[in-house]
Image (tube, grey):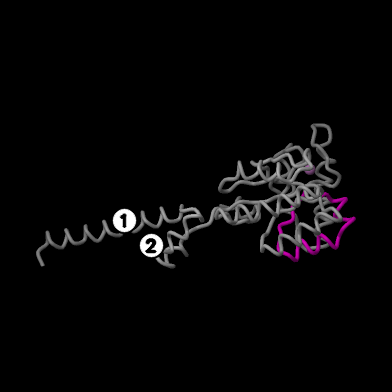
Amino acid sequence: MRKWLKIALLDLLLLLLIGMEYHCAETKMVQNRDVEAEIDTFGEGTVSQTTPKKIALTFDDGPSAIYTTRLLDGLRKRGVHATFFLLGEKVEQYPDIVRTMYEDGHLIGNHTYSHMQLTSANMDRFEEELRKTDEAVYAITGEHTEYVRPPYGIWNKRYEEDLNMLPVLWNVDPKDWCTPDAGTVITRITEHAEENAIILLHDCYASSVEAALRVVDILQAQGYEFVTVDELIME
Ligand code: NI
């Protein structure tokens, strides 16, 4: 074969490969509502390459006696894992709920012992609260809390080295604690939901639990996959 022909054929092959690569990249961005169309056009092989958009539900201030149990039941039914930032004092109060939460595969994080707000005057006590909460969780699950939701979002980097804990903030805040209306909470979440978002909720209100479960149904139908925050942070 002539040399120029060989080069031309190689170039053509390369172009084809690049074309396929582009196609895959585009396919990955296809949202779930288009998946039906994808099945018709490209067959199952292409669908399996579609990466769902990841999103995380996080719940602070629990566990709470009634609502956390209701939430865990609903999440289990939907096969969804969430992240719970627990208060140490409530962990000691409801160890069975924490055990169920852990066994169900949820990620358990630290929200201090008594919902302490960090100030320049209480840095050591804040650290103690993080340790105490970690110990309370460890006694139940055998695992340390690696992630912290600092109350009011106030944090100091020194704890990352001292305690080997990472702060996790949020980017969707429906302010669920100031409305008893689940519909309002749902709208505030779905309007701001996006890939890799971290949603802040509290599992101590009936309306928040109801909203969370309905949000799961709505966003799953839009192609979202609910993951624990470590899956978003590690990327
Ligand atoms: Ni809180």
Q: Which mark is residue 114?
A: none
Q: Residue 16 vs residue 62: left or right?
A: left
Is residue 99 found inside the magenta-colored segment of the image?
Answer: yes
Residue 44's spot in the image, x, y percent? 44, 67
- Amino acid identity at mark 2: Thr
Q: Residue 183 vs residue 192: left or right?
A: right
Q: Magenta segment range?
A: 87-110
Give the number of marks.
2
Instruction: Please name the residue shown 68% across and 51% down the image.
Output: 57
Measure how far apart labels 1 and 2 are at the Cα level.
17 Å
Residue 207 versus residue 136 in the image, above or below: above
| Mark 2, secondary structure of its residue | helix
Q: Nearer the viewer, mark 1 or mark 2?
A: 2
Could you say which is closer to the camera, residue 101 or residue 193? Answer: 193
Q: Residue furthest left?
A: 2
Q: Which mark is residue 19?
A: 1
- Residue under pointer 2: 41
Q: Earlier in the sequence, mark 1 or mark 2?
A: 1
Q: Main secondary structure of the magenta part?
A: helix
Residue 86's spot in the image, x, y percent? 79, 51
Is residue 105 found inside the magenta-colored segment of the image?
Answer: yes
Question: Which quarter of the rendered image does ligand 1 occupy?
Answer: top right
- Amino acid identity at mark 1: Gly
